[in-house]
Image (cartoon, grey):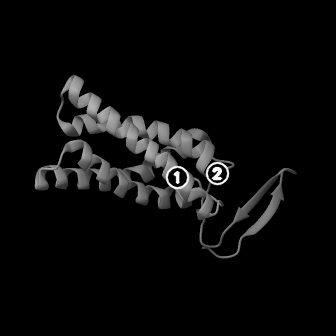
Amino acid sequence: MSGAKHCAVTAGTRTRCASPAVSFVATPESAPMPFQFIRYAGAGLIGTAAHYAVLVVLVQGLSMDVVIASTVGAIAGAGINYALNHRFTFASRELHRRALPRFAAVAAAGIVLNGLVLAAMLALVGPHYLVAQVVATLAVLVAGYLANRAWTF
């Protein structure tokens, strides 16, 4: 993965490691939750852009069902999000063989939540599919961050 890490014990209890390939101001141990959530949301914007691009192309270009198209887009976005969150948001030292299956489980739950919220919004409220998708995205953003922070990375 990355180069050698240089570690030092600080404050008598914490081990801080720096990788020559990564230089972040705040580590997962030191980043306040709001700061880390902003990083998570920023990384998520990139994955969400891919998700929405796939969604629009499949719905408008191929006349695919909205929930199926959104699910395909969410899977594409999840791959991007894993790479960014492992490296950028959480600067995780977890091995991919441990973090990736956990992330996949959280992403799968997020895809299910996305589909449920999207279908409910379309059935109950009936807004344009992109408006419904924004509501679903916000629900998945919060749930995914909390699960990934606590369990994945």
Please tell me which residue lies in front, 69 or 138.
69
Cα–Cα gap, marks 2 and 1: 16 Å
**x and y, in percent, of residue 116 in the image:** 34, 34
Q: Can residue 137 be seen in this view?
A: no
Q: Which of marks 2 and 1 is nearer the N terminus?
A: 2
The residue positioned 50% from the left and 46% from the top of the image is 106
The residue under label 1 is which amino acid type?
Phe
Q: Which mark is residue 103?
A: 1
Q: Is mark 2 on a helix, strand or loop?
A: loop
**x and y, in percent, of residue 77 in the image:** 37, 55
* Location of mark 2 (residue): 28
The residue under label 2 is which amino acid type?
Pro
Residue placed furthest toward the right:
12
**x and y, in percent, of residue 44 in the image:** 42, 50
Number of labelled discs? 2
Please tell me which residue lies in front, 151 or 81.
151
The residue positioned 19% from the left and 51% from the top of the image is 56
**x and y, in percent, of residue 83 in the image:** 48, 61
Q: Which mark is residue 152?
A: none
Q: Report whether 45 appears left or right of 12.
A: left
Disc 2 residue crowd, few under 14, some 14–19, many 20+, Cα 10 Å: some
Q: Can residue 16 be seen in this view?
A: yes
Which quarter of the image is occupied by the N terminus? Answer: bottom right
Q: Report whether 28 appears left or right of 9.
A: left
Disc 1 residue crowd, few under 14, some 14–19, many 20+, Cα 10 Å: many
Q: What element carries label 1?
A: helix
Residue placed furthest toward the bottom:
3
Q: Which of marks 2 and 1 is in front?
A: 1
Q: Report whether 15 appears left or right of 85.
A: right
The residue positioned 60% from the left and 63% from the top of the image is 97
Q: Are marks 2 and 1 in contact (CB under 8 Å)?
A: no
Query: In the rendered image, which quarter is residue 109 located in?
Result: top left
